[in-house]
Image (spheres, grey):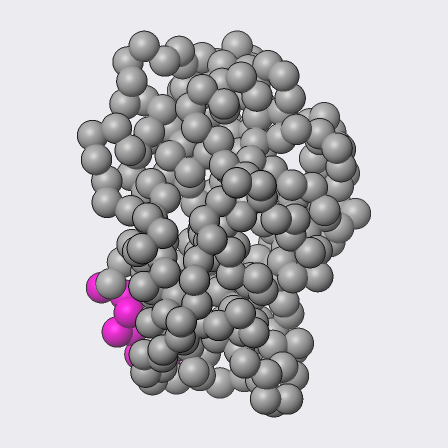
Amino acid sequence: MTSTPVRVDRVAITAEKLQKKIAAGRDVVVLEVRRSPRAIGEAGQRVPGAHAATLADFAGPETETSGTFPLPSAEQIQAAVRRWGITSDSIVVTYSPDAAAVAARAWWTLRWAGVPDVRYLDGGAEAWVSVGGILTDDIAAEGASDFVVSTGSLPTLDADEATALARSGVLLDTRGAEPYAQGHIPGAGYLPGAANLTEDGLLKDDEALRAQYRELGVEADTAVGLYCVVGNAAALSVLALAKIGVPAGYYAGSLSEYRTDPTRLIATGADRG
């Protein structure tokens, strides 16, 4: 299936703009995404009206060869989308008190599933509070919709494609220097997912993002792919590249899937290998 380009104005949203859209009565669906269901009940942590979600909503069951967070089936993600009341007219906003990368995984999965307008809340709940927003204990009631997903709306990579891209284009490991040196896909460079954020936890501005990726050989027309261990940090980098108009392939299985086959090569050290 041909992937659908992401509009750069539909990648992230500021807390102030989110407040304005809610006040204007737009069909806004907010998802608070946690790593684990255990964290859902934490008091006073939620943007009003947000639905509670976890990473399990955005991943299929783990198998011996799938990696930790494989892509969900169309049936699974469609059931979740309908449960949250998402329609083709909705503006879906994801954030996570746990990590920016967790919200990015939700953003990526929904866009991959064909939800047309999904935006990452830049700065998360902290940004919401900084512009006068309150947090609540309430969880939104389940919604209902007849939305039909269309998986494949963003480009993906499997192990063989990631390996090939490391030689023919740019493949980036989105972990840090130490885990990269301990083992990475041969030919891959690295840039931590967190490098897309400022010290305040906001996405870097477009100029700064372009500069850091240009140093790694990534331009607007470069074939580029991202991976990490389980797919979360890589999703944040895909999101950052989408913000500057660069489509990127996403290896959802990442190293947790790659390493399930002992015949696949692993490079070590600081060199790409």
Q: Please tell me which residue is depicted at 57% across the width and 26% down the height of the picture.
A: 171
Q: Quadrant of residue 261?
A: top left
Q: Is residue 100 above or below residue 22?
A: above
Q: Is residue 194 something one can see in this rendering?
A: no
Asked whether 188 or 150 is in front, the reply is 150
Q: Residue 77 placed where, x, y %?
A: 36, 57
Q: Please tell me which residue is depicted at 72% across the width and 26% down the height of the picture.
A: 217
Question: What range of the chain is rendered magenta?
Answer: 38-44
Judge from the rendering whether residue 205 lies leftward or rightward of residue 106; answer left or right. right
Q: Residue 215 placed where, x, y %?
A: 73, 29
Q: Please tell me which residue is depicted at 32% across the width and 42% down the height of the picture.
A: 69
Farthest residue in the right direction?
207
Q: Residue 259 placed where, x, y %?
A: 32, 22
Dominant SS in magenta: loop
Q: Residue 125 placed where, x, y %?
A: 49, 71
Q: Is residue 42 magenta?
A: yes
Asked whether 239 or 215 is in front, the reply is 239
Q: Please tell me which residue is depicted at 27% across the width and 58% down the height of the picture.
A: 36
Q: Quadrant of residue 179?
A: top left
Q: Is residue 205 magenta?
A: no
